[in-house]
Image (cartoon, coloured by chain):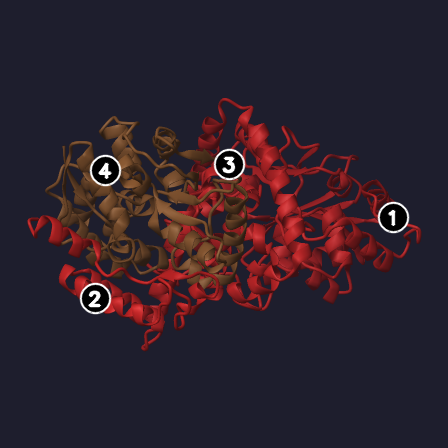
Amino acid sequence: MRIALFVTCLADTLYPQAGKATVRLLERLGHEVVFPSAQTCCGQMHVNTGYQREALPLIRNFVETFSDYDVIVVPSGSCAASIRHQHSMVASRLGDAGLARRADELAGRTYELSELLVDVLRVEEVGAYFPHRVTYHPTCHSLRLLRVGDRPLTLLRNVAGIDLVPLTDAEGCCGFGGTFAVKNADVSTAILADKMRNVLATGAEYCTAGDSSCLMHIGGGLSRLKTGVRTVHLAEILASTRDDAS
Amino acid sequence: MSTFLGLPTAPRGVGHLRGDDPFPVAARKALDDSQLRRNLAKATTTIRAKRARVVGELPDWEQLREAGRSIKTHALAHLDSYLEQLEREVTARGGKVHWARDAAEANRIVTSLVRATGSTEVVKVKSIATDEIGLNDALAEAGISAIETDLAELIVQLGHDRPSHILVPAIHRNRAEIRDIFLTEMDDVDPGLTDVPAALAEAARLHLRRKFLSAKVGISGANFAIAETGTLCVVESEGNGRMCLTLPDTLITVMGIEKVIPSWADLGVFLQLLPRSATGERMNPYTSMWTGVTQGDGPQQVHLVLLDNGRTAALADEVGRPALACIRCSACLNVCPVYERVGGHAYGSVYPGPIGAILSPMLTGVEDNASLPYASSLCGACYDVCPVKIDIPSILVHLRARHVEEARAASKVPTAEAVAMAAASWVMASPTRFAAAQRGGRLGKLIGRGGVIRRLPPPLSGWTQARDVPVPPAETFRQWWRREHGASE
């Protein structure tokens, strides 16, 4: 299958390893990955901070860049959710019915990584090897906006060598929330403190999730406290093989 | 984008819909209170688990939620006719209906009704609407003392405090604190009072019993009003409300106009949704309903004050409108990661938590509560538990847009944030500009050490106060792609 990658502005700039892993994984599974180079950002930060007018050019750029592709993959639950639930809404509220319609159509062909693997490519065992103790944080938008359910956990359970340990209060928010983390930095940090406490209690070496933004938040806290626990994107675990380990 | 300046919002200077400090400032104080954090975490975790258990028992929970949502949507769409029907039915059965456009008018109406009885003391059923309008303060100014009879409201009142939860107003207090409040403030208390819950409840019971037996006037809110018969309904746990509703000769009910539902059949839906969502009970212990005046039984003077106080303005906002469907169960508070850490006071309004973050700004006008729509990480847990399916996260996002647009319209000089957002939009609308900005961002390596950045300038300093940021990698994804795959697409 020919799959267009929307890597997200955050992964593109700060976490390219998540994008590279997505490419490596899909190619290993025998698919062709393309990267439309006109892509930038989905506009979620603008919409969620109240700047819908400023989001509109980004939404238009996304729609124009990806309209010609049949299947789009996004290694981020919240960006995929923004594309699915916000693009058309913002376009129609700002009076661009044509863009709203195109955004709606495109949203139906846009998948978060675990959705693409399980629902479209029908694969639950990706042939990965990751010999580490790992705990999984489900991220709010994957869980409650996309309803990915246990797809990521199913994929992780099938990874060879992994020691997957459950996270207490896993479904609780990590406190990121985009600009919330800056506008309400103290509350965000307080929520993060509880998430880190739960992560540390698992004894895991890695905390994984399907979203670089939540991982930036959790990982930023774990790094500041010198916990030694690292964050890793779901795609990176699924892309790892015995060759990487040797 | 529409603005909603045409309809009157809840006036300033009266009632409790606005806080003294913006949310982030008020929240900081709350976060430092370790006793509060402990009380809240314990209480919200307990209620969350109870709710999940009893909701899980019902195979048709999702259909019930949908029924609740659709009844409320219908009632709000035909609010004018249902309110007039309610007025006709209440009047026909011997009650008297008063219309109050705002808090000040409602306070004037209630004060003059109490004065007319000659009474200087009233007993109150737990009611958020009367707290919203600051009724107790207005009555006190007129020389009338209002006694809260809900145990938690009594604790709050005696402690010269403010409620911090819709349903559990004293959730921020533990039993040792409650014992101290009773010992200091209750004139008839046993000085040997312990902090055993049963002893505390007994002390309150003895104190309140005397008040119930002497009160000539009762004041309540209402959970529901049934238009077809003019019946009012109060749902509670203690029975103290029932005392206030039945013993006094005069009963005055203050109710937001959004509480009306068409029929008794509709009430059946909400009596299933509310207790399970609120206290995690299958049914609440006391459900009181009264229809006008019954000769020789219960209050012989029955008044209903219908309160707008910004509700019509909220109704005019077609995206935010579903906020008026709220049945005050507070399930959204109990699951909210923000509420769980800061409690209710930080929201500055009688409506805290996720529902308060949308309802308060809609009642006051967004600019009077501009920090509240941002008091959420948009995690969505509130929407999942809402018994009438209010999409709180989407309304939060909508109110943020209203705030940005109203601020934009009001000021000639854009805020620093608005400038940054416009710049980010300009950069990211073009892949060329975005790639150039990424290269600029790599200057971050100059301030990074050991692969991470530990301090960023304001406003991003809020991030680095507790979280590192990775130094931007030497190669962005798109550079890697171009190197590996060429610039094919």
B212 is higher (above) or lower (below) than B177: above
Chain coloured brown: which letter? Answer: A
* Residue under numbered circle 2: B439
Quadrant occupied by the N terminus of chain B: bottom left
Please check whether the numbered discs 2 and 1 fall on a single chain: yes
* Residue under numbered circle 3: B387
Q: Amino acid at mark 3?
A: Pro
Mark 1, secondary structure of its residue: loop
Between marks 1 and 4, how big is the CA–CA gap? 65 Å
Question: With B179 as the anchor, is B410 left or right in this view?
Answer: left
Q: Nearer the viewer, mark 2 or mark 4?
A: 4
A28 is higher (above) or lower (below) than B396: above
Q: Nearer the viewer, mark 2 or mark 3?
A: 2
Q: Residues within 10 Å of mark 3 (few under 14, many from 20)?
A: many
Q: Amino acid at mark 2?
A: Arg
Marks 1 & 4, CB-CB < 8 Å contact? no
Q: Quadrant of residue A201?
A: top right
Chain B tint in image? red
Circle on res. B194: 1
* Residue under numbered circle 4: A25
Between marks 2 and 1, how big is the CA–CA gap? 67 Å
Chain letter of the residue carrying label 2: B
Q: Amino acid at mark 1?
A: Thr
Question: With B24 as the anchor, is B488 left or right in this view?
Answer: left
Q: Nearer the viewer, mark 3 or mark 1?
A: 1
Q: Residues within 10 Å of mark 2 (few under 14, many from 20)?
A: some
Viewer can see residue B119? no
What residue do we see at 69% from left, 55% from top? B35
Q: Is A86 in front, or is A157?
A: A157
Q: Amino acid at mark 4?
A: Leu
